[in-house]
Image (cartoon, grey):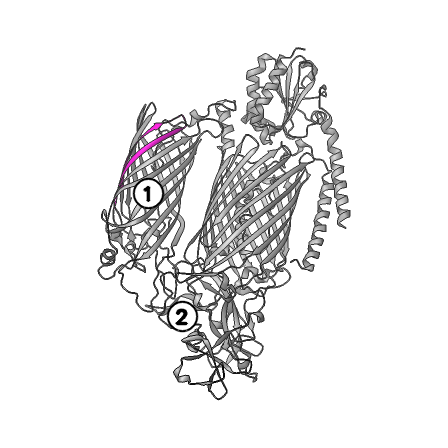
Amino acid sequence: MIGLNDSCLTGLAHQSVNNPECSDSKTGPGATAKTTLQALTSAALVLPGLLLSPAQAASISTDSVSFQYNRYQEGKRNLYNVSSNLDPIRVDVVHGSGNFTFHDRVKFSFSYTQDTWSGATPVTSAPLVANGNRPILANSPDGVITVGASPLVNTRVLLDQNLNPLKLTPEGGQVVDPRTVLILSSASPETRNQANFRLGYEWNEAAVNAGGGFSLENDYESSYGNLSGRLDFNQKLTSLKFGAGYTSSQTSAILDPDLLPYLTRTAYTNQIERRDGSEILRGDRQDWTATLGLTQVLGKNSLFDTNIGYTHSSGFMENPYKAMTVIFINPEFINPDANTPIVGDARALLEQRPNIRNQLALSSKYVQHISPLDAALHLNYQFSFGDWGINAHTFEADWVQPLGHGWTITPRIRYYSQDSADFYQPYLISNQAFRKTATDASGRQIWVDANNPSEQFFRNGNGNFFDTDGNPVDATELNLQPQLVSFDAAKLPQNFSSDHRLSGFGALSGGVILNKRFSKGVELEAAFEYYTRASSLKLGGSGHNSFADFDFYVANAAIKVDMEAIHSRMNVATGRDHAHHDHGQQHAHGASPVPAGIMFGHMLDNPGELMVGYRFMYSRQAGDMLRGAHQVSDLAIVNEGCSDVILCRFTHTEMNMKMHMLDIMYAPTRWLNLMIMPQFMDMDMNLRELAGRPPRDPGVHEHTGTGGHTTGGVGDTILSSLIKLYEIPGHRLHVGLGISAPTGKVDLKMRRMFQVDGGLFHFDMQLGSGTWDFLPNLTYSGTSNRWYWGGQLYGVKRMESSNESGYRLGDIFQASAWGGYHLSNWLAASVRGVYTYRDRIHGDFNKFNARIGPMDFPANHGGQYWDIGIGVNASVPSGKFAGNHFAFEWVQPLRDDVNGFQLEREGALSATWHYSF
Amino acid sequence: MLSLMMAMKITRFAVIFILLLIIFALAGCVQVAPWERGNLAKPHMALDPHPLQSAVQAHNYGSREAAASTNSAGGGGGCGCF
Amino acid sequence: MIKLANLLLSAGLMCCLAMVTPVQAHLEGNTPPPSCQLTHLDGKSAENWEALKGEVIYVDFWASWCPPCVKSFPFMRQLMRDFEDKGLKVIAINLDENVEDAKGFLAKHPANFPVLLDASKQCAQDFGVIAMPSTYLIDKRGLVRHIHRGFRAGEAGELRILIEQLLIEKI
């Protein structure tokens, strides 16, 4: 039967393969619920080191900081007959960067990027008739409906004598169906972190830069360094640029446990490490790059820029999550009758790319000022080619149009076309059996004793068995099996990939960028782009892979704060010119410093004042499981931690939460401040199996998460006002009234594995509360000489009874009191005591959740907590960086008294930066 | 190993590139006085007027396309200020 | 073919360098400044250097679009405050192609020193201005003693010392 997994039918399943479809054998707890399919979809082709942000290369960099949020969203892939509920790829990116000048000619810049990926990616492509995307059916009031699709890569495919795939007609006949389809696999969210730095020195007519950085994912790590320089000639009308870079990358990919039983990975035996039932594919890669460029001013209104770049890559360049569908045809079974279809044995082999890649790219850019409109036209063309056979052309045109009042609009259009890599194929057909019985030189079948596989026997044409010495043996006394030999890899192409990014295609995209520059030195930027990839758009004819067509959009928003502009504006405003004047007084808030862990703790004093800040919070839970305030045994958790009907099987061993928050505050009047605080979260959690847990149900796979799992993305957004109630010298009191808008998702799901839905992530792994929350708070602060002190009452009241996933988080009440001392004019240290009460979760998930441990039950949330915080505050009192404030605080738990069963807290770190002007 | 074809292609490429360099080096003899660079100094005439966007684009295109990049931004043009 | 190309390239670069070098050499050392026909913002013509002999003159060529020029304005204002009564004259020569740009700039960055216009740009050419901003220090004898190109806050101290030295010189 076509479409069924053949290894169940033929019994030819390789001994080492656990096949969950036809046995109860399991890959064990290590078969992690997390795979990282999507991560490398980014990393495999992109080399972050070679694409070091051009922002850092600006010739006139000013002291500035910027924050950017970016959303990448792909459209659904065309799966023809299967309607998939798999979410397409989506990426949330948070980016922060800063440029600073020291001693006039020394420039330092850094940037930090965090992206969270989720969604379904293609693992391979195959003839449509192979039914690789198997519909997932579910009962509904309207009957059986398709709720999704799961990948199925080992199937039988019928082919005609010309090797065209055949489809069965309802009448029992066969017709050619030449269509190919992508086979998708879903994935849980995955986070990547990247940090870059760059240090540069400038002469009047030259510059050198040294940069470096790293990009970290669970399965892919890159680190890189580069050197670049610029020489100006001819009164800076001509600039010569050069650069060289090196990137070293390591892949350690946990192969998709869902695909593993069907994945042929013999080519990588030496690179695969088995651990806890998972298979980890490792590989190293090096990239060297060199660039040479020239910028030439052509006239008062135009300039030209041309660059040549060479990249040499070696090592493991495969995407470890991409497989090639190879249809094996056993020539012995081909019926000479032309009307009898050939039965192909479709298998998925890990892709094999060449271990060397050389690429050369030439780009040129022409910029023309359109004087009547004061616009700038940017025209780009780039050609690149390499020894993989991919010739690529890129054309881009941008029209940058200033509109007055600080507004600029930039429509842009881009066309891209590439040829296919030499080794790209949607799928391969190989004229040999995938696996067949072995025969010796004289044509006798080789058999082995299953109990002693090293001993060989032979069977002659009469069905009699002989040992290696030619003596007849009694087959009934031995457990004899035919010895199997796998396909001959030499008969396959040396390199092959079905990654459609290596296919021939064209892409058209267009977008618009909108900028608004405020006189204060703040600039907002927003951009949108729509991109469509089409095989038919390829230059010089179709790429014949329209099955892989897709589209995406990108939307982003950024805020840039130009400290240099602010500084010079303030100089003008105050009429104070000396470069080293005491700028700090303008920034010294009447209020004393507040520990970093306190939110809503200080107010701006001057009407019209603006503050931009960034807050980072990290908290960690690890250590013992608690019941109330005391350590609890595994057995107690198993029996009492979950519910009357469900016993606990797992618990978490650690949970880390990181939060990045942008903090923008404005003072319309002296007594009122308005704040907006968008948040970006990422969390990770590791689980362990509880001792004494109930045994597994045979045949049912469990989501264990023992390999760890992560979530991340946009969190809730806080809008708040601060109102000054009382102020006398040395004492002030203000109240904060805020709301938290439910912009963070509360329905994040674990990926589907082994044909089992992962269900919703644990409560603590969701990104927001899901409800509109009210955030009242009251802060008192005082100061006398070098001492300062304060206290805050802070609350969170959920204003809805449940969120879209059916529950609501507990209300929070927190009281803090702190005291601190100014060690010098720029440094202060503080101690804070904190008491927190947090209610349990009310309601419960209204969607499927795996309910594997205490963290999945509402009663095991909330409690009372006592902490002590040790903090330092630093501010730059004068000079060009005056107005920058930094604060750090470590909050150490003293006592936990939790509701139900919970993991002990280890502590929390808060770090803030803010700049007001 | 570079194939012969590749080597030939590179040679052809290098020649084209050098010819381009010459053309623009000669064009460089066209003088633009330091005080005539007001338009060139405008932010929207910068080689990369939207660096934040370029970084996003480079990453998006780079993850969906197989072309190499020249990493072209590195200065040049602009106001010609010291 | 590549050899030929290299040859052409070098020839091209030589041609450009040949055009640049003589201009740069024009004002090094103790030479009197070229005479200039400058006007005030209101169009009235300004007096020549000769009239200012006996004073130290800080001549600054600038344009509204030049970022380092923005930074040099506070410095020049401070020079006026500190040294005007000791015999320093700061003269800022604007090279904007559109006078309105200069006026807009001055509205945002007020000057406490005279700003003159070089409408024909002849003065800038004669001074051999090759970068924005360019500063020329003229001593009491009327000789250009120092040329400074660009403006960076860290170099301001050096300039102040030079000015102080020129101010205490006797004619």
| Placement of A865 over or under B12, stated as above or below | above
Q: Secondary structure at mark 1?
A: strand
Q: Which residues are magenta?
A: A813-838
**Is residue C110 at least partly visible in the picture?**
no
**Residue C83 in picture, x, y percent from top left:** 58, 15
Q: Secondary structure at mark 2?
A: loop
Near mark 2 (Cα within 10 A), the count class, few <14, some 14-19 or many ≥20, is: many
**Is residue A168 at least partly visible in the picture?**
yes
| Placement of A643 over or under A327, stated as above or below | above
Q: Quadrant of residue C111?
A: top right
In which quadrant is the C terminus of chain C drawn?
A: top right
Residue at 48% x, 32% y is: A520
Magenta segment includes A306: no
Are marks 2 and 1 in one subunit?
A: yes
* Residue pointed to by mark 1: A907
* Residue pointed to by mark 2: A19
Toward the bottom, the furthest residue is: A462
Q: Quadrant of residue A14?
A: bottom left
Q: Are marks 2 and 1 in contact (CB under 8 Å)?
A: no
Q: Is residue A560 left or right of residue A688?
A: right
Subunit of mark 2? A
Q: Amino acid at mark 1?
A: Gly
Of mark 2 and mark 1, the one earlier in the sequence is 2
Calculate the distance from the C-alpha at mark 2 to the C-alpha at mark 1. 43 Å
**Residue A6 in picture, x, y percent from top left:** 44, 75
